[in-house]
């Protein structure tokens, strides 16, 4: 089952601290949405509001068109996959997975069959009689997922569920999560602070900062055409060059560049979009140093026009950068953003 | 140095267990007085004790009071600990302090207080009155043990249970209580031993249906006899058995 979620102007105040400052967001049924942001940005609070663990100070939560703002967690069509899994240590895996169905009054045999089917979905069908302490971290993760999905929620909330796993397992679980979401079609709302994870799994990323939504869009949109400086730098390394817009061109320390803009701006360039080719000429620059990273050379350039400025560029594997040498730099996919008030 | 250590160990254990050892030894005394010289062994005192209807009634009373009062103390202690561990209440620290405070009050004072309260209410001394007294002394113990055992681990599991559709009493019954099985058993069995051995409250709050320690006391007033030693040995045996069972099951499991 699946449902759309509508978050309408949610404010959340804890004492003197405002965790959410009027957040509004529409999530389509069956969408995989990732709430991304640094710790303290309000993403986990927003998830708790969706799950019903926190009642917002003001604003409304609609799930499947019904107002859920005051409904307690047990009566919501949502379930949560918790950060620490929160499995029941005194129950077998089958009992853990069947717990939600038991609360819904389903009979023993029916529960058992469903629990086994769910465990099979996450590849643990042979461990139904084990207890959680006998499992590895990744296996517990899967049980938590099976338990949350067993009751066929309209919306599954995932609270940094992959945070405790090592890198390799995390990648594997990301793929599995995405595949399972496609299969069951449930709306997933996933919280993380890891932008690579967000890009790996999301249909749509919601970048949050200081209790507000900074940016919303597909991984490509957010990475290539971010709508705020925060969003641009949170998604990955970026060069920022101050610029002043003069209509059809911008003045920068590198000289005038043929870009349309007006007022105080910041020119943002990803390191992999600076190199020997591109539509936007940046002038000549001296290579200060470089290091080989396997997939690319990471280089620091000092533009001749502005020797104090440093540009980070990723040159292709095949390049042979010589420190001290001078080369003409070009850029692709430039993004001009309004300068933020300091 | 090594011999000194062994000597110290022997003296320490001797100091603790010599009185009990003497008690048990002279329960097998052949003559009518439980004093040296020892001439036995014989089991006739045990036979006499086990055939004594009053004594057996007292034993049954003791067991009843111990089990029922411990169960009530455990239930009340569990609910209090859950409430104070999970919810922010005004004056939580004070409430906790007041709940634990009876542990520091002597049983005699508690018994006197209960006696005057019951007199005021017109409740006659009885087995039930003693049971209430034992709940009073064991509730703080159960509360303290369970409160200390509650952690974030449980809190998260409870949250997950609510998320999956459990209402509050289902959370308590299916998640909180089973996760606390080991400390609950520890609190229960400790309460049972304390109630089983307790004398002063039982002495002041019972009249006709007495518990075993009170029966023992009334036998002692008519003079020493190996029979009293035999009862004492039986009481000791039950206490020790409960503690050993506890050590083997609950504490060993908790350490794992």
Image (cartoon, helix red, strand yellow):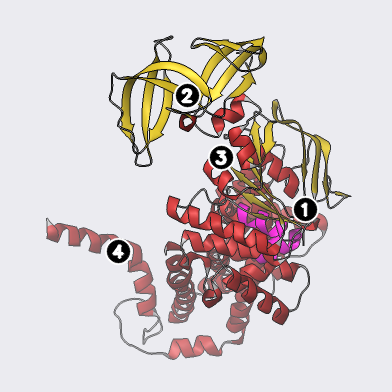
Q: Earlier in the sequence, mark 2 or mark 1?
A: 1
Neighbours of disc 3 within 10 Å: few (<14), some (14-19), many (20+): many
Magenta-tinted stretch: B156-174
Location of residue B12 in the rendering, given as x and y in whole percent from the top left corner = 28, 60
> Mark 2 to mark 1: distance in Å?
43 Å
Nearer to me, A55 or A188: A188
Q: Secondary structure at mark 2?
A: strand
> Mark 3 to mark 1: distance in Å?
24 Å
Location of residue B29 in the rendering, given as x and y in whole percent from the top left corner = 36, 84
Location of residue A106 in the rendering, given as x and y in whole percent from the top left corner = 76, 75
Neighbours of disc 1 within 10 Å: few (<14), some (14-19), many (20+): some
Q: Secondary structure at mark 1?
A: loop
Is residue A294 found left or right of A113 in the rendered image? left
Q: Main secondary structure of the magenta part?
A: helix
Is residue A73 found left or right of A123 in the rendered image? right
Report the mark closest to the observer, 2 or 1: 2
Q: Earlier in the sequence, mark 3 or mark 1?
A: 1
Q: Is residue A124 above or below residue B54?
A: above
Asked whether residue B152 is drawn in magenta, I would say no
Q: Which residue is mark 2?
A: A330
Q: Which residue is mark 1?
A: A29
Q: Is residue A273 above or below residue A217?
A: above
Q: Which residue is mark 4?
A: B13
Nearer to me, A220 or A228: A220
């Amino acid at each position: 089952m699946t449902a759309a979620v509508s978050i309408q102007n949610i404010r959340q105040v804890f004492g003197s601290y405002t965790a959410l400052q009027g957040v509004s967001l529409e999530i389509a049924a069956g969408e995989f949405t990732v709430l991304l942001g640094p710790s303290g940005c309000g993403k986990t609070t927003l998830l708790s509001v969706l799950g019903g663990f926190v009642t917002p100070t003001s604003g409304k939560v609609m799930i499947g068109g019904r107002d859920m703002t005051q409904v307690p967690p047990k009566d919501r069509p949502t379930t949560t996959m918790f950060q620490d899994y929160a499995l029941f240590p005194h129950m077998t895996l089958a009992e853990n997975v069947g717990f939600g169905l038991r609360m819904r009054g389903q009979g023993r045999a029916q529960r058992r069959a469903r629990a086994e089917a769910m465990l099979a979905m996450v590849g643990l069908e042979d461990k139904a009689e084990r207890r959680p302490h006998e499992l590895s971290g990744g296996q517990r993760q899967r049980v938590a997922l099976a338990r949350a999905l067993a009751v066929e929620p309209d919306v599954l909330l995932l609270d940094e569920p992959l945070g405790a796993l090592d890198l390799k397992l995390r990648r594997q679980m990301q793929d599995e999560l995405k595949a399972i979401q496609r299969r069951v079609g449930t709306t997933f709302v996933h919280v993380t602070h890891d932008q690579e994870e967000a890009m790996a799994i999301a249909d749509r990323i919601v970048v949050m900062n200081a209790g507000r939504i900074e940016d919303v869009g597909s991984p490509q949109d957010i990475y290539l055409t971010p709508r705020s400086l925060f969003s641009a730098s949170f998604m990955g390394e970026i060069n920022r060059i101050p610029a002043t817009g003069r209509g059809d061109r911008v003045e920068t320390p590198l000289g005038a560049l043929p870009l349309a803009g007006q007022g105080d701006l910041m020119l943002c360039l990803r390191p992999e979009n600076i190199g020997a080719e591109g539509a936007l000429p940046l002038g000549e620059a001296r290579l200060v140093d470089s290091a080989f990273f396997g997939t690319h050379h990471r280089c620091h350039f000092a533009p001749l026009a502005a020797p104090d400025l440093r540009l980070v560029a990723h040159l292709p594997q095949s390049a042979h950068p010589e420190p001290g040498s001078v080369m003409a730099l070009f850029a692709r996919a430039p993004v001009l953003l309004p300068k933020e008030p300091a | 140095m090594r011999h000194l250590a062994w000597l110290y160990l022997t003296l320490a254990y001797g100091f603790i267990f010599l009185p009990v050892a003497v008690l048990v030894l002279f329960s097998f005394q052949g003559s009518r007085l439980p004093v040296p010289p020892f001439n036995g062994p014989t089991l006739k005192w045990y036979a006499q004790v086990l055939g004594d209807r009053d004594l057996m009634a007292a034993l049954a009373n003791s067991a009843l009071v111990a089990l029922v009062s411990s169960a009530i103390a455990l239930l009340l202690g569990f609910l209090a600990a859950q409430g104070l561990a999970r919810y922010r209440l005004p004056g939580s620290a004070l409430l906790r302090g007041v709940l634990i405070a009876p542990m520091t009050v002597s049983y005699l004072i508690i018994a006197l207080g209960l006696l005057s309260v019951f007199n005021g209410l017109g409740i006659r001394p009885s087995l039930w009155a003693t049971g209430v007294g034992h709940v009073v002394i064991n509730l703080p113990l159960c509360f303290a043990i369970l409160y200390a055992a509650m952690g974030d681990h449980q809190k998260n599991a409870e949250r997950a249970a609510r998320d999956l559709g459990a209402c509050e009493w289902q959370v308590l019954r299916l998640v909180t209580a089973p996760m606390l099985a080991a400390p609950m058993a520890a609190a229960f069995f400790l309460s049972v031993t304390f109630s089983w051995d307790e004398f002063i409250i039982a002495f002041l709050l019972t009249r006709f249906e007495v518990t075993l320690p009170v029966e023992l006391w009334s036998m002692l007033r008519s003079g020493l006899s190996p029979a009293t030693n035999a009862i004492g040995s039986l009481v000791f045996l039950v206490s020790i058995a409960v503690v050993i069972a506890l050590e083997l099951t609950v504490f060993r499991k908790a350490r794992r």
